[in-house]
Image (cartoon, rainbow, N blue to C red):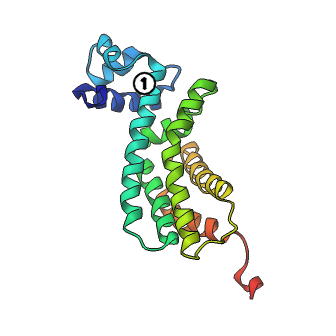
Amino acid sequence: MKRNKPKYKQIVDAAVVVIAENGYHQSQVSKIAKQAGVADGTIYLYFENKEDILISVFREKMGLFVDQIKEVINSKQTASEKLLVMIENHFNILSEDRHLAIVTQLELRQSNHELRKKINEILKDYLILIDHILRYGQEQGEFAAHLDLRLARQMIFGTMDETVTSWVMNDQKYDLIALAPAVHDLILNGCISKDHLS
């Protein structure tokens, strides 16, 4: 399997840096090869073309995302805690790798329909994790039984995603991880005043 070959990860990591710094369309395979310290031809032993590199970058990094987040989620008891650690980890992983944040938030938003389909396919595992938290919350009586899971999942992922995109667009000037509790509170409690409810 090519993913286990020694230079595969080296090329994927190099691609993240090159695509983040030059943009997907300006990132020639030769630039990625140079960054990875391999010959141009070596790239084609692992990847079909530049599109395959972009998809592979997302698949690899999203795989790590899911593994890391699964681990921390499993250590928490309530659905609310699980959701908070998911948001914290999502923000943490991207704030620790600024190049990856640029690639996931800007460069993966390609207009190419086929490319988008492949990206959405990879995203499914991550969205399933959100579904698990929501269902668990319903089973425990923390979340409403009538909750529209699809809509709730879209809102949770969309909120996290847009928060990271805004941070990237603002040149990553502020502390992204510090926003996690506020995002968590907004998702769980919305904009309703507690005084208004009593």
What residue do we see at 37% from left, 21% from top?
Answer: 32
Badge 1 crowding class, 10 Å Cα cut-off, few under 14, some 14 to 19, many 20 or more, is many
Q: Is 6 situated left or right of 74 in this image?
A: left
Helix, strand or loop at label 1? It is helix
Q: In the picture shown, does residue 15 fall above or below 197?
A: above
**Number of on-image labels:** 1
**Which residue extends farthest right?**
196
**Which residue extends farthest bottom?**
198
Q: Is 62 situated left or right of 184 in this image?
A: left
Please provide percent x and percent y for residue 14: 34, 29
Q: Is residue 41 at least partly visible in the picture?
A: yes
Please provide percent x and percent y for residue 188: 62, 69
Q: Quadrant of the N terminus?
A: top left
Please provide percent x and percent y for residue 134: 57, 63
Please provide percent x and percent y for residue 177: 47, 59
Q: In the picture shown, does residue 12 fall above or below 82?
A: above
What residue do we see at 54% from left, 30% from top?
Answer: 118
**Which residue extends farthest left?**
6
Dot 1 amino acid type = Ile
Tell which of 11 and 152 is nearer to you. Answer: 152
Identify the residue position indicated by label 1 in the image: 53
Q: In the picture shown, does residue 93 fall above or below 133?
A: above
Q: Quadrant of the C terminus?
A: bottom right
Residue 112 in which image quadrant: top right
Residue 109 in which image quadrant: top right
